[in-house]
Image: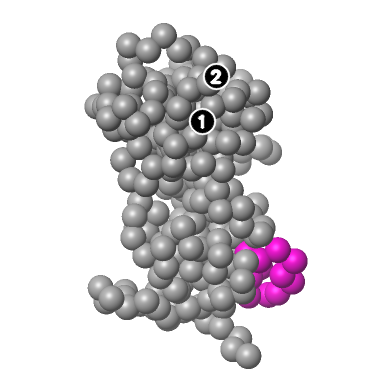
Amino acid sequence: MSDRLTIAIPSKGRLREPSWSLLEASGLAPEEPGERVLIAHCRNADVDVLFVRADDVPEYVQDGVVDCGITGLDLVREREGNVDILLELGYGTCSLQAAVPTEDTATSLSDLEGRRIATSHPRLAAKALADAGVNAELVKVVGSVEIAPRLELAEAIIDLVSTGSTLRTNGLRTLGTLFSSQAVLIGRVGEAMNEERATLITVLGSVVNARANRYLLCNVPSDAVDEVTALLPTKGSPTVMPLATPGVVALHALVPANAIWQLLPKLERLGATSILTLPVERMVH
């Protein structure tokens, strides 16, 4: 049996490029495949990358064809794959939403009682409707679900939404989110956590964590350190170092990237100067 770890990633679609980018950023140095190549080898690790349809990744993993795989959580749940979620990857975010034509009077999922609903995710849609106690007829559609109401195939849709622009373009409005999804690393249920798999999770996780954070550096008046520390949305204490200028210290901390917008003006008001935020390459908790 080969000691090489095999990982399946989407061969095309919205998850293909970010998945490849994640492997590159992790330092695995995968060899760029040709247009029709189905497998690539990594130069810096005993890892082989297999390119398959995103829909098929859960089956490849649960059947033991590959050790791990990257695909959307929505596909894992829709396929009812017998797999473990090893790591959330932080990209490919989208949500399953119910939507109706803008002129429709429906305002909530319960208003879809007894209606025909088009969807390309019948299992997820059926579960969401059942959880809400709504009885409706599901019409499975492959392809552009958003056009179904216009063609009178259905009165509403349940489909994956990223930005909502496609809904608006097709004259639809959302009734709310039923399920949230993102790219995930999956493994076979009950598979032993060997050294290779543990290493892959740690290395990929370090990149995912790093992308979600920024390294903050700033100069802070000594008498404002407590206020600044209380303001920082971070776990643990920041690093505080004295400077040559009396009454001023340098403060270093890791902060969530999504907090930077609100954080910077607050730091300025507390007297912070020379504020820098830097990307982080690796971060292991």
What residue does disc 1 label? Answer: 137
Residue in front for this viewpoint, 284 or 229: 284
What residue does disc 2 label? Answer: 113
Q: Which mark is residue 218?
A: none
Range drawn in magenta: 187-199
Secondary structure, mark 2, is loop
Task: Reply above or below: 186 against 121.
Answer: below
User: Residue drawn 49% across and 34% down?
Assistant: 138
Q: Mark 2 touching mark 1, by CB under 8 A?
A: no
Amino acid carrying label 1: it is Glu
Q: Position of residue 177 (x, y in %)?
A: 51, 27
Q: Badge 1: few (under 14), some or many (20 or more) residues near its Cα, within 10 Å?
A: some
The N terminus, quarter of image:
bottom right
Secondary structure, mark 1, is strand
Residue in front for this viewpoint, 197 or 199: 197
Residue in front for this viewpoint, 124 or 234: 124
